[in-house]
Amino acid sequence: MEEHSHHHDHNESGHSHDISNLSGRKIFWVTLLNATITIAEIVGGILSGSLALLSDAVHNLSDTLAIALSYFANKIAQKPKDKRLTFGYKRAEILSAFINSSVLLAISMTLIVEAIKRFQNPEEINSSLMLVVALIGLIANFISVFLLERDSHENLNIKSSYLHLISDTVSSVGVLIGGLAIKFWGIVWIDPLITILISMYILRETWNVIKKTVSILMQSSAELDYNSIKIDVEKIEGVKNIHHVHSWLIDEKTIFFEAHIDIEDQLLSHVEFIYEKITHLLKEHYGVSHVTLQAEVNCCEDKNIIKV
């Protein structure tokens, strides 16, 4: 039996979306804007008695921390592999996305509880102050969302921070509408209602990020068509069977793939050509980044593609 492990790296470093352009002006303005909104809404929320403003303030505080955490996590992810972390540091971004989303999930649930209490015991609200602060928050959030919009499409880490910002933009619109309703129609209960609606929206959005990050951290299989891979690989001359496949993701884009391949007994130098064909297939047609193959000659009794 000939056994050999073959590794192929396909532009792994290129998969980590470089947000170094987020450093300079972008990170400064986004952080400054969110810090300003937070202070304004905490003061405005306390003075006006608006729970919706205070909920926005808490969200914006978490935004400021989220952007900073995402930024530093991305910087860590850029670090090259070393002897201690042979897979590299890309998981730092997944951890950041998980932490950001989990914090926002907890905050949203807390706000729902507080809003329900407010329904039971309505409080007087200064709608004029509420409107002014909400408008300031809305403008600042629009600017922050604009700055991060492009980066959010290609990076789960940045998306988690972007969701913080987009949720606060929606939140500010809601608070603004609530302030108008309280000012002109005296509908005080709209304040906790808006808080609940905003929190429910955020719960749904962050839950999707949490599910994906947990899946990656739990080494769940990549979403590949394994039956098609089996058919395509076994069409390659010299390959009798592919089995015991394992796949996982380092981040949302970098797929690792390993498998046993059953081949005809032949020279190791000939096996290298088979490796190259399989690696090329997986790389070009299935988006796999790193391939490890183990060649066997009638070794494993279990020939199932996935061993459980």
Image (cartoon, grey):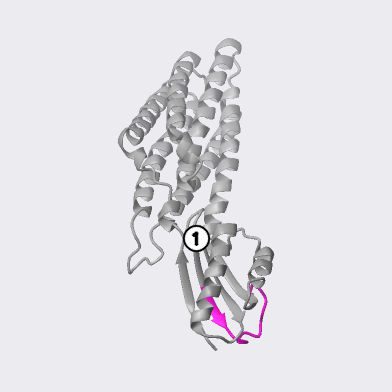
Locate the C terminus by quadrant: bottom right
x, y percent for residue 201: 59, 36
Q: Is residue 220 visible?
A: no
The residue pinned by badge 1 equals: 289
Outermost residue toward the bottom in this view: 1
x, y percent for residue 270: 52, 80
x, y percent for residue 106: 51, 45
Magenta residues, dominant SS class:
loop
- Residue depicted at x 60% and y 23%: 190
Crowding near pointer 1: few (<14 within 10 Å), some, many (20+)? many
Taking the image as shown, residue 169 lies to the left or right of residue 241, namely left
Outermost residue toward the top in this view: 184
Q: 201 and 260: which one is in front?
A: 260
Locate the N terminus by quadrant: bottom right
Q: Is residue 276 visible?
A: yes
Position above or below: 225 against 242: above
Please, what is the three-letter code of the amino acid marked with disc 1?
Ser
Residue 266 appears in which quarter of the rendering?
bottom right
What is the span of residues highlighted in magenta in the rendered image? Answer: 293-308
x, y percent for residue 36: 36, 27
- Residue depicted at x 57% and y 52%: 211
Q: Secondary structure at mark 1?
A: loop
- Residue depicted at x 44% and y 57%: 11
Taking the image as shown, residue 46 lies to the left or right of residue 153, namely left
Position above or below: 127 against 280: above
Q: 33 and 21: which one is in front?
A: 21
> How many numbered dots are placed on residues in this image?
1
Outermost residue toward the left in this view: 24
Taking the image as shown, residue 11 lies to the left or right of residue 35, namely right
